Amino acid sequence: MKTDIDFYFDFISPYGYLASTQLERIATAYQRRIEWRPFLVGVTVMKIMGLKPMMQTPLKSDYARLDKPRMASLLGVPLASPDMSRSNSIAATRAFHWIRDRDADASVAFAKRVLHRVWVEGRDITPPEVVVEEAAFVGVDATELLAALGTQSLKDRLQREMDATVARGVFGSPFFIVDEQPVWGVDRLWMLEHWLRHGHWQRE
Amino acid sequence: MKTDIDFYFDFISPYGYLASTQLERIATAYQRRIEWRPFLVGVTVMKIMGLKPMMQTPLKSDYARLDKPRMASLLGVPLASPDMSRSNSIAATRAFHWIRDRDADASVAFAKRVLHRVWVEGRDITPPEVVVEEAAFVGVDATELLAALGTQSLKDRLQREMDATVARGVFGSPFFIVDEQPVWGVDRLWMLEHWLRHGHWQRE
């Protein structure tokens, strides 16, 4: 029984974006659907795991600065390097789930636009107005979404999503679950492909 | 100008052991030498980075418990699962550098024995007596090494090694540096191989 590939990522995670550029090719090759599941990785890392954000962690931040453009080059995709120190993906993530509950295809198109805006164009996606602007491009009613973004019911919707995400053991971006197998990291796409090809973890 | 592959790892790191089972094949294929560089990853993670040990980090510890046997299976090598909660690699790492300063080949043979003892046989390597026992198998004078293990000069020797390790930006186990390119993680052996094959980070 083939399940979807659950694709967990944060819009403000460069490695999440990098994974998004590869995943459709992989899913198509192995005839799987992708379920896009943006979440707030900062909440997981800081509140649940008790760690610092990657770019505030000594040594690891230097490595990441060097590694991000290198990984983009290896994957053959563009990668901007915007200053993310004041950015967050709360509005974008709420908007995604609001759209997802109404139109799955539009939510995927929206996710791709948001990732493109940050990681190809190098522009911020923090303000709700910007998020709504991107949503309008995929046919979402801007006024309706902007009103929804501030509501308690949408906050609760994202909270339920976050609870379910943590309950599944997801802690990083990107993070994939397929056939109940968790795989963390864009550097492990080879491992995801191994599972999709073989359905086991033995050596080829 | 081809440099050695600097192979940083901690004896008590299962992922370091897993990398050690693959690296000689890779190095031979691309005609590189390996410089084995055991260090104390707990010092880096806790004192420099301010993080918790992996197995005490919520979510990540559950993932690692599932991932370690899976990665061993993918690589086709055995992996024991000893209780490491009271283990440390201080004596083994000091012993390694003491041996390394006297006989490079013996130090590599010693490192392999220690890794085998922990990660294949599932036995502890914390006590100095055990470390010395393993060293004796590769021709080291047990009495001389046991006496050296408690000396200030050997403590200082390891401290200098740790300082140099951190200065090079190393923070995890395993960690590879070749031609000044840092690569972190057994899940990135493919990336190390890409560099060794091509000498650049562009897509093939």
Image (tube, coloured by chain):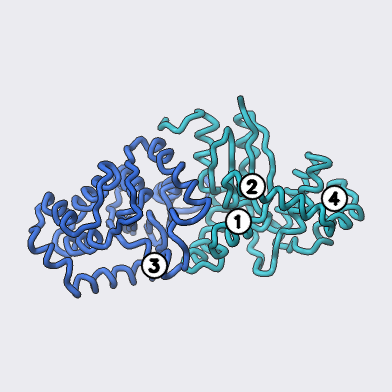
Chain colours: A blue, B cyan
Q: Which residue is mark 2?
A: B165
Foreground label between 4 and 1? 1
Q: Earlier in the sequence, mark 4 or mark 1?
A: 1
Q: Secondary structure at mark 1?
A: helix
Q: Secondary structure at mark 3?
A: loop
Q: Same chain for the residues at labels 4 and 2, yes or no?
A: yes
Q: Same chain for the residues at labels 3 and 4, yes or no?
A: no
Give the chain letter at badge 2.
B
Residue B76 showing in the rendered view: no
Question: Which quadrant of the figure has residue A7?
Answer: bottom left
Give the chain letter at badge 4.
B
The percent position of residue B2, horizontal first and vertical second, equals: 61, 27
Q: Please say if A67 is above or below A98.
A: above
Residue B109 left/right relative to B75: right
Q: Earlier in the sequence, mark 4 or mark 2?
A: 4
Q: Which residue is mark 3?
A: A168
Estimate the spatial distance between the alpha carbons at disc 3 and disc 4, rounded to whole Å: 46 Å
Estimate the spatial distance between the alpha carbons at disc 1 and disc 3, rounded to whole Å: 29 Å
B85 or B101: which is nearer to us? Answer: B101
The percent position of residue A55, horizontal first and vertical second, equals: 43, 53
Which residue type does callout 2 highlight? Thr
Foreground label between 1 and 3? 1
Give the chain letter at badge 1.
B
Q: Secondary structure at mark 4?
A: helix
Residues at circles 1 and 3 in contact by the CB criterion of under 8 Å: no
Q: Same chain for the residues at labels 2 and 1, yes or no?
A: yes
Q: Same chain for the residues at labels 1 and 3, yes or no?
A: no
Which image quadrant: the N terminus of chain A?
bottom left
Q: Which residue is mark 1?
A: B44
Q: Secondary structure at mark 2?
A: helix
